[in-house]
Image: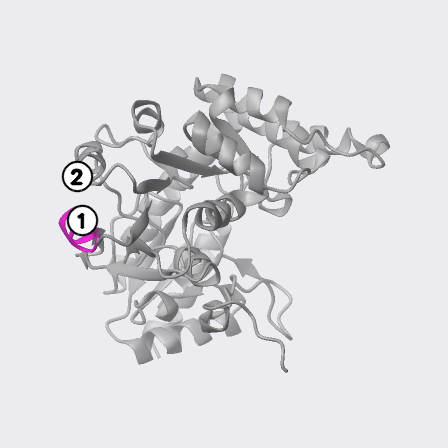
Amino acid sequence: MALKPQPGIMDVSPYVGGKSKVEGVDRICRLASNENPLGASDAAKEAYQSIADDLHRYPDGGSYLLRSGIADAENLDADRIVCGAGSDELLGLLIQSYVGIGDEVVYNEHGFLMYPIGTKIAGGVPVKSAEKDLRIDIDAMLAAVTEKTRIVFLANPNNPTGSYVTEHELRRLRSELRGDILLVIDAAYCEYVDNADYISGASLVEENDNVVMTRTFSKIHGLAALRIGWAYCSTEVADVLNRVRGPFNVSLAAQAAGVAAIQDKAHIERSKELNSRLLNWFRQQVAELKLTTHDSVGNFVLVNFGGAERAASALEFLKNKGVLVRGMAAYGLAEHIRVSIGTEEEMRVVIDSLTAFTNE
């Protein structure tokens, strides 16, 4: 008899990350993965290098110093924090822990692809809720809930649209969900948001036993290579996650760099200032090319080319210029491309390349 994987696994289309190189092109602008163009802070780099003599040692399995550093920086309870190899791992562990074969997981129409992928791996059924004008529609999300729903995923801010759900909307969603449904707020880009009506979700975690907020060090902290994420949740959910995660799932180097990174407020502020300034400048320049962009509170922006074929042509044109951005067909947004905000030099290269494309 032939080997047979568990139900759902062969239905998965593997996640494909942003490209990082082009054959025959030396100068590359990597703007496909929403990375911090400033990189990691000097403090994080020094902390990373400081553990060179301890590479033969296992890391702290409970990530105590990292959890304590996060708790101090964010004014949270360290006992409610669980660290992982990127927030991807924690999202997958939550599905593994609370979703069985035939159970349903609700997520927004243009949400992170790992939500349906993780659900299928667990044998569950991903249920997509419609968005309205590239914004999460709370009514549609609630309407998608059935007796089989076990988790509702909500990315806030949302990638790739750049839109966000207000505190009022988020609280309404939580209040109208059943108590046996886990609400997971994926706040990977929350550090970029200063809007008064936005919350990361931490307060909802402290008010409810069935809310989880996930965060990452891959974006504003510039530590994508180290794969560090964390979840803030009830002590009951934390207990579950600590039972299913690997015993040494966060490396010693990652823990050391993470502690230094989250304490470096100056680097965080520099990253926010650069992103805000260049995002606004980029959108203005794109508008002069008669292309449409969408409001974004993240470190990326969607550019609408008015049709799937033209977006695909732009993607290929930019690639040949060494500008690597992200096509959005997999997210149901084939007429768009997503551009991460890079350095000022990189953004000028993008505008020059887009200008050349529109003038063809």
Magenta region, main secondary structure: helix
Identify the residue at horizontal 65%, vertical 27% (top origin): 43
For the C terminus, the image quarter is: bottom left
Q: Residues at badges 1 and 2 in contact (C-beta under 8 Å)?
A: yes
Residue 142 is covered by the magenta coloring: yes
The numbered dot on residue 22 is none
Position of residue 215 in the picture relative to residue 169 (left or right): right
Answer with left or right where residue 201 lies relative to residue 227: left
Which secondary structure, mark 1? helix
Q: Height in image: 283 above or below 310?
A: above
Q: CA distance from mark 1 to mark 2?
A: 8 Å
- Residue located at (26% from left, 47% from top): 163
**Viewer-side residue, 145 vs 134:** 145
What SS does tag 2 mark? helix
Residue 213 location, x and y as percent?
39, 35
Which residue is at the front of the view, 348 or 21? 21
Residue extent of the magenta highlight: 136-145
In this orientation, does residue 184 appear?
Answer: yes
| Residue where numbered disc 1 is placed | 142
Residue 264 seen? no
Q: Nearer the viewer, residue 203 or 69?
A: 203
Can you tell which quarter of the image residue 113 is in?
Answer: bottom left
Disc 1 crowd, CA 10 A, few/some/many (<14, 14-19, 20+): some
Q: Residue at x 39, y 71 (%)?
A: 356
Residue type at the position of mark 2 = Glu
The answer to which of 147 and 110 lies nearer the viewer is: 147
How many C-alpha atoms fall within 10 Å of the one at disc 2: few (<14), some, or many (≥20)? few
> Relative to residue 149, is residue 169 depicted above or below?
above
Q: Which residue is the site of mark 2?
A: 176
Quadrant in which residue 337 is drawn: bottom left
Residue 187 occupies which quadrant of the picture?
top left
